[in-house]
Image: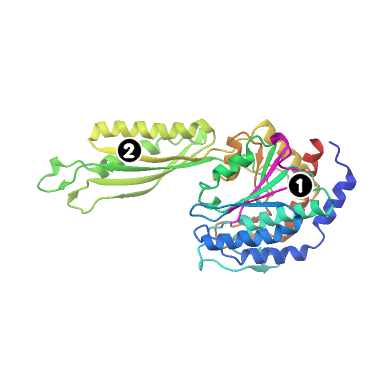
Amino acid sequence: MNLDRSSLDRVYQAAARDPGALLDVLERWVEINSFTGNVDGVNRMGDQLAADLAPLGLELTRRAGDGVGDHLVWRTAAWDAAPADRRVLLVGHHDTVFPPGTFEGFSRDGERARGPGVLDMKGGLLVVRTALAALAEVGALAGMPLALVSVGDEEIGSGDSRPLLEELGRGARAALVFEAGRADDGVVTRRKGTGGVKVVARGRAAHAGNAHADGINAIWALARLIDRMQQLTDYDRGVTVNVGLVHGGEARNTVPGAAECGADIRFVHGPDGEGLVAAIDRAAREVGEETGATFTLSGGVRRPPLERTERSAALYRLYAGFAAERGLGAGEAALVGGGSDANTLAAIGVPAIDGLGPRGRGFHTHDEYIELATLVPRAQALAATLLALAAEA
């Protein structure tokens, strides 16, 4: 690595230039309601993000969302000319989880900032902006084969933006993702894969008193299938099935002709996801033969797992070294049950680490906050990591 101390010191100083100005930017962003379903709000947030990144001189393209907010991509001048295996992708999202009127406004409580999305993940986007501004100030940004993507649908699974993420990430050297920082600053190197299965059971309706024997009870058949689905859970393998929604029937004295359920599936290793879906399908056929009911299944794997690899572990160690130097925790986070866009990129072979936003707690709750003192160190660790990756090329 040809990274010299003077380059690091200059970028550290640039990132710490005006901490007060960071609060102004963060407040401006958090005050915009960008709930995923509020497409106009998501796009207003995207417009503000574009305006606040404009001074960096990056090329901006906008990919229109289909029923969701637009997805934004910024590229350095060096991105297009570089081979894929030198490119580094920074990944964020500008949608949040709170509908208008449910949790609004930015506030400061001592050394904490509070508000919808302050942690997940407008604080993470601010870390990125601060780091890139520091690199631009010292003249290092333009020559880096770097792209930043911020999607408008991450909170509902990135279904619309996934092709864009795969297009940008394919063959890339590294992906850094800025989901909520953990309370101990642990870097996320593993996430479970996620999915969902909807099951619709069809039986035969009949009067419970006069024609009970003529009916096929869809609720009973579905209950038998639910029991088999739940038994697919294997904690030792990190596999869980949770049937969390059940509907069915019309009246107490009617044999129900229809019922349905919704199941959440989680898994640590990629093959287990499709294996779970296949096992549920087999169980449905078996229960159908036993009861006379028919089952229709939909859904499946939504996000593959983020699995730790030798290359992602090396990326983690590189980042963690700079994080420790800036006074942050540098350990690895425990296995995370929820997915993110890091999962999507890891599934196509990109070394990815996550959880690089500011330290905080309470994401997806009304108690969401960040610790303001971690914004600059996180930006410094990111800028140093990008300098080091560029020096290694």
Q: Quadrant of residue 232?
A: top left
Which percent across, then down, holds residue 88? 71, 41
Q: Is residue 92 magenta?
A: yes
Q: Is residue 190 above or below residue 69?
A: above
Disc 1: CA contacts within 10 A as few (<14), some (14-19) or many (>=20): many
Q: Is residue 179 visible?
A: no
Q: Give the numbered dot on residue 323.
A: 1
Q: Is residue 161 above or below residue 24?
A: above
Q: In the image, 141: left or right of 217?
A: right
Secondary structure under tag 1 reads: helix
Disc 2: CA contacts within 10 A as few (<14), some (14-19) or many (>=20): many
Toward the viewer: 24 or 189?
24
Q: Is residue 189 above or below residue 153?
A: above
Q: In the image, 111: left or right of 337?
A: right
Residue drawn where x is 85% and y is 52% of the image:
138
Which percent across, then down, holds residue 66? 50, 52
Q: Report the Cα–Cα distance between label 1 and label 2.
A: 49 Å
Toward the viewer: 207 or 65?
65
Toward the viewer: 106 or 85?
85
Circle 2: residue type: Leu
Please provide the residue range marked out in magenta.
71-94
Which percent across, then down, holds residue 186? 68, 46
Q: Which residue is mark 2?
A: 225
Q: Is residue 207 magenta?
A: no
| Residue at the extreme right of the image, as rendered | 6
Q: In the image, 76: left or right of 294?
A: right
**Which image quarter is the N terminus in?**
top right
Which percent across, then down, holds residue 181? 66, 51
Residue drawn where x is 62% and y is 64% of the image:
30
Circle 1: residue type: Ala
